[in-house]
Image (cartoon, helix red, strand yellow):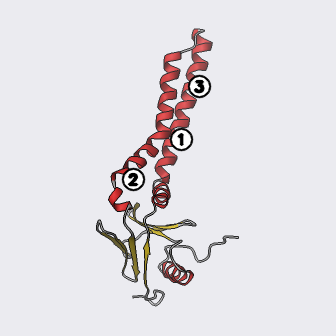
Amino acid sequence: MTPTETRIRVEFTVPPNRAEQRRAYKIVHRVLFRIFFWFAIGLAALAFADVVLAVTLLHRIPIVDLALLLVLALWAVTFPRRCGSRRLRAAPRYFANPVTFEISEVEAGETSAVGHLSVRWAAVTSVVETSEFWVLYADRTARLVLPRRHLTATDEATVREFMVGRGLVPEQTSEA
């Protein structure tokens, strides 16, 4: 243990909350949502360019091409959301049970009736901090989502100070 690290032991239990799980899923997969959104914008622009070229060069409106590209654009926007809904519905037992989170100087983990998941701090490469969650990443993959609203102010400050000491989150966030 280095001098900048502190000993911590924080444990809290989160009651089942499907809405919170949906928000966590959206935060973890935000890059996927963004990629598919821009892909859909590109398809819509391609459909527009196809119409303009067909009208100016062929003097006709390409209904089939236009419809196909617009359907693909709509599919690209809705695909990640449909996948997320299916994944969230596929694990009802997990979301129907309380989850206990344990944070120590060695690892952070969660335990529920379904099982135990933990990530060692040595493996954590980055932490994405939002107003609701801390998302712990190891090798560019989200490993654990810690809900912040269930922590007491003292515990949140302790965990944040620990992560600042490890260089995972910035020193101070201004939420004014």
Residues at marks 3 and 1, CA–CA distance in whole angstroms? 15 Å
Which quadrant is home to the N terminus? bottom left
Amino acid type at mark 2: Leu
Of circles 2 and 3, which is in front? 2
Report the number of numbered marks: 3
- Residue 164: tell me if it is visible: no
Q: Pinpoint residue 85: horizontal percent, then vertical percent.
A: 42, 48
* Left or right for 148, reference 92: right
* Circle nearer the N terminus (2, 1): 1
The residue where tag 1 is placed is 38
Question: Eyeballing the image, is 31 above or below 101?
Answer: above
Q: Do the numbered discs 2 and 1 sit on residues whose CB atoms are within 8 Å?
A: no
The residue located at (52%, 47%) in the rendering is 34
Indicate the secondary structure of the residue bearing disc 2: helix
Q: Which mark is residue 48?
A: 3
Amino acid type at mark 1: Trp
